[in-house]
Image (cartoon, rainbow, N blue to C red):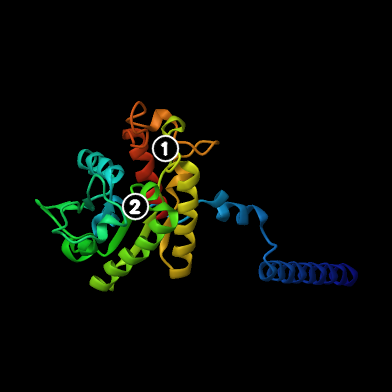
Amino acid sequence: MMMKKSILCVMVLLLSVTLLLSGCKSRTDQQNGTEAPATAATEANYGYDTTSPKSAEWFDNAVFVGDSVTLKLSYYCASHPEALGAAAFYCAGSLGYTNALWELDNPEAVHPYYQGETHLTEDCAQLTGKSNVFIMLGMNDIGLYGTKGAMDSCKVLVGKILEKSPDAHIYIQSVTPMIKSAQLETFNNKLVKEFDDMLKRYCEENHYKYLDLYSVFADQDGNLPENLCSDPDSMGLHFNDTACQMWVDYLQKNA
């Protein structure tokens, strides 16, 4: 009987040591970041944001500044209130970073139309009462002023917005691609991508949120697929409803 008790005590002691060593290894692996490769892969999620998607109501505090591409999104959201909630849209058809800097009385000026009047783009947050400013401009700048000229105007405009509304949060959306047949010598997807790369660096340097819509809509050759385009026989760069829903989905997951 005494021998059986001794054997049992030894077995209990060995089990305790095993569990202790196992716990130490687990803690060491956690500290070294080697514990669960599968978990790490899940968290990375192949480059996509892993936070919970934002609700439509989150965008109640957002204003979208843009050109005719964003105008289409505004029409889509007007008929789909579950998309971006009560977000404000502050747009003009040919608006760009450069002509947004012109005075209201300039006869060639292009300014956003909001609540029945045209306004300076820099007043977007102040006038709408929204603090999350989503900007998507540049499409109307690249062909006229080049990528550098467009980028210079972007910096000035963002500075003016923050001067008027220092508490605003800046979200800069990339310019989106056009269909293959719509490209021109002075305005094409190669130049759009070059400009978008400049926008991304600018956002990283200034801690603004960069939203890569180009990658959402570009096919393997960097072009907008025709089945997402509403005007494939003319300008070849505006979206249909399917593309707008893709845009909304991306914003809800990545804004």
Neighbor class of circle 1 (other Cα within 10 Å; few <14, some 14-19, many 20+) is many
Q: Does dot 1 land on a helix, a strand or a loop?
A: loop
Residue 7 lies, in percent from the top left, at 87, 68
Q: Residue 88: which disc?
A: none
Q: Which corner quadrant holds the N terminus? A: bottom right
Q: Is 124 positioned to the left or the right of 21 in the image?
A: left
Quarter of image, res 62: bottom left
Select label 2 or label 1 by which is in front: 1
Number of numbered markers: 2
Quick one: 232 or 31, which is closer to the camera?
232
Residue 165 lies, in percent from the top left, at 25, 71
**Residue drawn at point x = 35 percent, y = 51 percent:** 141
Quarter of image, res 69: top left
**Residue drawn at point x = 62 percent, y = 57 percent:** 40
Q: Label 1 is placed on what type of residue? A: Met
Q: Quick one: which residue is furthest to the right in this view?
A: 3
Quarter of image, res 35: bottom right
Residue 50 lies, in percent from the top left, at 49, 54
Quick one: 116 or 130, which is closer to the camera?
116
Q: Residue 178: which disc?
A: 1
Residue 28 lies, in percent from the top left, at 71, 71
Q: Does dot 2 land on a helix, a strand or a loop?
A: strand
**Residue drawn at point x = 37 percent, y = 50 percent:** 251
Q: Label 2 is placed on what type of residue? A: Met
Q: Which corner quadrant holds the C terminus? A: bottom left
**In the displayed structure, would residue 146 be above or below residue 159?**
above
Neighbor class of circle 2 (other Cα within 10 Å; few <14, some 14-19, many 20+) is many
**Residue drawn at point x = 33 percent, y = 52 percent:** 137
Residue occupied by mark 2: 136
Q: Quick one: which residue is furthest to the left in this view?
A: 116
- Of the numbered discs 2 and 1, the one sitting upstream in the chain is 2
